[in-house]
Image (cartoon, helix red, strand yellow):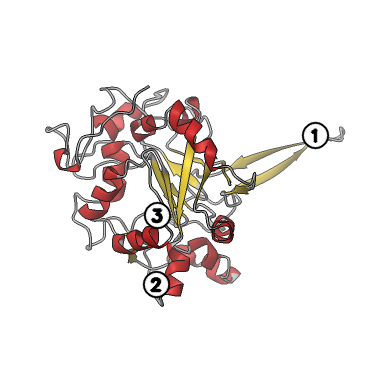
């Protein structure tokens, strides 16, 4: 399948009757994969060349981490079901699919003013039995699989005497990411899956149990993440990423509705609802960053297959990086 030429950023929105920045109709009127359409057999075959050492690194946190999720999300529950008198066990779990490492699907976040999701769908499209925009569509086509790229902003920031807490609102600047790309001689390619490490998991691991319990109510609050402005969005679009992810609990500077953002400009709105670009959060990137630095190689083969939750909003990532 030949690569599709994307419209320029300045041509957005494509659906002029829709909200700002949308690319609705780019892949067909009822398409449910969005930018994942960029992952073709050719891009997957090309990504196999990233495997040089056969080193496999899991990118998922345990399902019970964070122990006390933010945004009032349900905590992980696990129960062993002993089948006595047989020597046998089953088990059952209850989770919020966004309480640990996850991909946000296209049912998660819409344009807040127009109340529309990707492709112009609305909340009533997600009634009982509806599969519209379900995250299971990602798995049906083989998951989020291809060439991954890691930008280790956290290590770079420490080296450059920049001290921002990942547990407070703050901006990872686009200019800083471009500096990292230049210093590490990283080549970006269409259909890449972008990962940005801001240090959330590294610093979460150092918290006391008391601090973890109080994490959802910490003051000051907010999250460190990519600055959400038109320059950042232009960069994401023009690099034609298939998906983007971070180790933080929100990819962009949070809260996304903060006063530092224009009401109609947020990465959650434009990427999820506008372009169909999956957002990943709470990825465990610490071991991967250490190994990439050791090898001097910041690209890898990524296999990430979300659960087939019919009509699901989000899913654990089930992600492995192979170098």
Q: Is residue 82 visible?
A: yes
Counting labels gives: 3
Contact check, label 3 and label 1, Cβ < 8 Å: no
Give percent across and percent down for residue 283. 51, 52
Crowd class of label 2 (few under 14; some 14 to 19; many from 20; radius 10 Å)? some
For the residues labelled 2 and 1, the Cα–Cα distance comes to 50 Å
Q: Is residue 250 left or right of residue 209?
A: left
Q: Is residue 213 visible?
A: no
Give percent across and percent down for residue 217. 43, 66
Contact check, label 2 and label 3, Cβ < 8 Å: no
Give percent across and percent down for residue 292. 55, 56
Camera-side mark, 2 or 1 = 2
Q: Quadrant of the N terminus?
A: top left
Q: Residue furthest bottom?
A: 161
Q: Which residue corresponds to the image point at 52% horizontal and 68% vertical from the top-left? A: 203
Contact check, label 2 and label 1, Cβ < 8 Å: no
Point out the tag, 3 or 1, that comes first from the N-terminus.
Answer: 1
Secondary structure, mark 3, is loop
Q: Is residue 80 left or right of residue 114?
A: right
Q: Which residue corresponds to the image point at 53% horizontal and 34% vertical from the top-left? A: 307
Secondary structure, mark 1, is loop
Residue that badge 2 annotates: 164
Label annotation for residue 250: 3
Residue that badge 1 annotates: 83
Q: Is residue 8 left or right of residue 87?
A: left
Q: Between residue 134 and residue 265, name the one nearer to us.
A: 265
Q: Which residue corresponds to the image point at 47% horizontal and 27% vertical from the top-left? A: 310
- Give the vertical position of 147 relative to 40 (above or below): below
Label annotation for residue 261: none
Crowd class of label 3 (few under 14; some 14 to 19; many from 20; radius 10 Å)? many
Q: Quadrant of residue 54?
A: top right
């Amino acid at each position: 399948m030949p690569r599709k030429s994307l419209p320029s950023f300045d041509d957005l929105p494509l659906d002029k009757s829709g909200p700002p920045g949308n690319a609705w109709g780019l892949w067909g009127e009822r398409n449910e994969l969005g930018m994942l359409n960029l992952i073709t057999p050719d891009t997957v075959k090309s990504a196999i060349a990233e495997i040089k050492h056969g080193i496999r690194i899991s990118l998922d946190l345990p399902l019970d981490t964070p122990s006390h999720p933010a945004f009032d999300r349900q905590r992980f529950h696990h129960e062993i079901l002993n089948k006595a008198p047989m020597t046998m066990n089953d088990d059952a779990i209850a989770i919020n699919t966004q309480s640990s490492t996850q991909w946000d699907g296209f049912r998660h976040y819409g344009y807040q003013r127009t109340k529309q999701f990707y492709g112009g769908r609305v909340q009533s499209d997600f009634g009982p039995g509806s599969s519209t925009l379900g995250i299971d569509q990602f798995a049906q086509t083989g998951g989020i699989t291809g060439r991954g790229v890691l930008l280790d902003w956290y290590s770079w920031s420490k080296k450059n005497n920049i001290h921002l807490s990942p547990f407070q609102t703050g901006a990872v600047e686009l200019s800083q990411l471009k500096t990292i790309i230049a210093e590490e001689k990283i080549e970006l390619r269409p259909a890449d899956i972008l990962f940005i490490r801001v240090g959330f998991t590294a610093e979460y691991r150092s918290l006391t149990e008391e601090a973890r319990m109080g994490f959802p109510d910490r003051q000051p609050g907010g999250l460190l993440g990519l600055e959400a402005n038109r320059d950042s969005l232009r960069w994401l679009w023009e690099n034609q990423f298939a998906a983007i992810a971070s180790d933080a609990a929100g990819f962009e500077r949070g809260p996304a509705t903060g006063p530092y953002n224009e009401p109609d400009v947020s990465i959650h709105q434009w990427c999820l609802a506008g372009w169909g670009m999956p957002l990943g959060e709470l990825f465990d990137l610490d071991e991967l960053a250490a190994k990439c630095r050791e090898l001097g190689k910041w690209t890898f083969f990524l296999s990430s297959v979300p659960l087939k939750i019919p009509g699901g909003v989000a899913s654990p990532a089930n992600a492995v990086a192979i170098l």
